[in-house]
Image (tube, grey):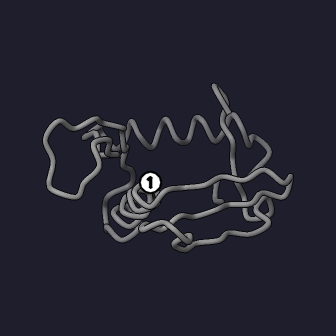
Amino acid sequence: MEGGVVVLRNEDVRRVLVGVPRGHRHVRALIELSDGSKLVLQEATLANIVRAYIAVATHPLRRGVELVGVRLKERKAGFAEYQLLESGRDEELVVSELAEAISRELPERGRGE
């Protein structure tokens, strides 16, 4: 995946498993692709993506958000040292970058998808 853009559509996903694996304390999501490859998202990653999605999808004006990986020296108890936090980047720049990446990978697709 290094350097390229991978677009996952519903037809690319064979199945998704979400749960707390035996011997673990946190939720994991396993995404099994139609080519047999698998992605595992840890709870914090999944939660941050969901949080960003909800922030955009449920807001009447907000159109985009960028999360960036930050290593925190100080944090609340129970929080991991490495976090995905909102960058504060202008949402129009976020939306433009997203549109550009998608248009390069899916030029034959309609813009409404």
Q: Front-most of 99 and 83?
A: 83
Q: Nearer the viewer, residue 77 or 66?
A: 77
Residues packed near mark 1 inside 10 Å, few (<14), some (14 to 19) or many (20 plus): some
Q: Could you tell whether 26 is left or right of 90 in the image?
A: right
Which residue is found at the position 55% from the left and 41% from the top? 99
Q: Residue at x 39, y 36 (%)?
A: 93
Viewer-closest of 111 and 74: 74
In x, y percent, where is residue 70? Answer: 30, 36
Q: Amino acid at mark 1?
A: Thr
x then y, percent, for residue 62: 32, 57
73 sits left or right of 43 in the view: left
- Say if 77 sits above or below 96 in the image: below
Which quarter of the rendered picture does the N terminus lie within? top right
User: 21 or 76, which is in the foreground?
Assistant: 21
Q: 33 left or right of 71?
A: right
Could you tell whether 106 is left or right of 113 in the image? right
Q: Secondary structure at mark 1?
A: helix
Residue 103, above or below 57: above
Q: Quadrant of residue 51?
A: bottom left
- Residue at the top extreme of this rendering: 3
**Which residue shows up at 67% across the image and 60% down it?**
31
User: Is residue 18 placed above or below 72 in the rendered structure?
Assistant: below
Total label count?
Answer: 1
Location of the C terminus (image quadrant): bottom right
Which residue occupies the extreme right position in the image? 35
* Residue shown at 78% from the left, 50% from the top: 37
Q: Position of residue 45 (x, y in %)?
A: 44, 54
On the image, numbered disc 1 is attached to which residue? 45
Q: Give the image location of residue 73, x and y in percent.
A: 17, 35
Q: Quadrant of residue 87?
A: top left
